């Protein structure tokens, strides 16, 4: 299942290293000697969790089905526009952040607001590409990996 999750992330333009860079950015003020390799390990550990894999695969599927015009209206329009009051994308992502406690949740909120790195690129997206779920899922993975580092230090 992890291989398929990684494959789908890559197909959508997301590499583990992209997420690890966000983790490093989040945790470097607290751990100045933090190495990118440690961040990659933390991201990999988060992606080993079955509930994380399920959330990522579900979110990517919903984004892709929306792109392919296979989601009925009015839901398709809501997802395409990533409407502000549609919080299901964040709810799905919160399932990932909850794995590592409140620090993951607060970091997710910060990343969702800041849209740093790959999160911002996904959020702004390409024409015809829907990443309503994916940008939040990537933020959640990064927040959970950052929380894992904090818990282990």
Image (cartoon, rainbow, N blue to C red):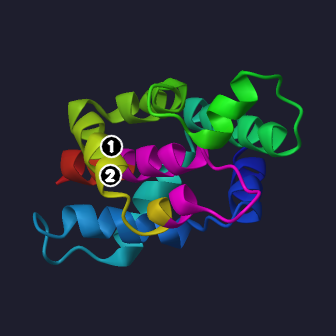
Q: Residues within 10 Å of mark 1 (few under 14, many from 20)?
A: many
Residue at 36% across, 76% down: 36
Q: Quadrant of the C terminus?
A: bottom left
Q: Residues within 10 Å of mark 2 (few under 14, many from 20)?
A: many
Q: Looking at the image, is 86 positioned above or below residue 66?
A: above
Q: Looking at the image, is 134 positioned above or below residue 33?
A: above
Residue 93: x and y in percent read: 48, 34
Residue 102: x and y in percent read: 22, 31
Instruction: Tell whether 139 sits left or right of 107.
Output: right
The chief SS type of the magenta part is helix
**Tag count:** 2
Q: Which residues are magenta?
A: 121-144
Residue at 42% across, 67% down: 20
Q: Mark 2 and mark 1: span between their CA atoms? A: 5 Å
Instruction: Tell whether 62 sits left or right of 71.
Output: left
Q: Which residue is mark 1?
A: 108
Label drawn at residue 41: none
CB atoms of marks 2 and 1 within 8 Å: yes
Label drawn at residue 111: 2
């Amino acid at each position: 299942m992890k291989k398929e999750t990684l494959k789908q992330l890559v197909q959508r333009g997301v590499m583990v290293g992209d997420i690890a860079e966000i983790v490093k950015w989040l945790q470097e003020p607290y751990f100045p000697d933090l190495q990118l390799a440690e961040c990659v390990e933390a991201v990999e550990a988060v992606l080993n969790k079955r509930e994380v894999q399920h959330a990522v695969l579900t979110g990517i599927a919903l984004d892709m089905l929306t792109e392919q015009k296979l989601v009925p209206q009015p839901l398709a329009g809501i997802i395409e526009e990533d409407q502000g009051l549609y919080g299901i994308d964040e709810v799905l992502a919160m399932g990932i952040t909850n794995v590592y406690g409140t620090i993951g949740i607060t970091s997710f909120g910060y990343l969702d607001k800041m849209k740093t790195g790959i999160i911002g690129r996904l959020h702004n997206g390409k024409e015809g590409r829907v990443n309503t779920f994916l940008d939040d899922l990537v933020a959640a993975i990064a927040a959970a990996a950052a929380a894992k580092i904090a818990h282990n230090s």
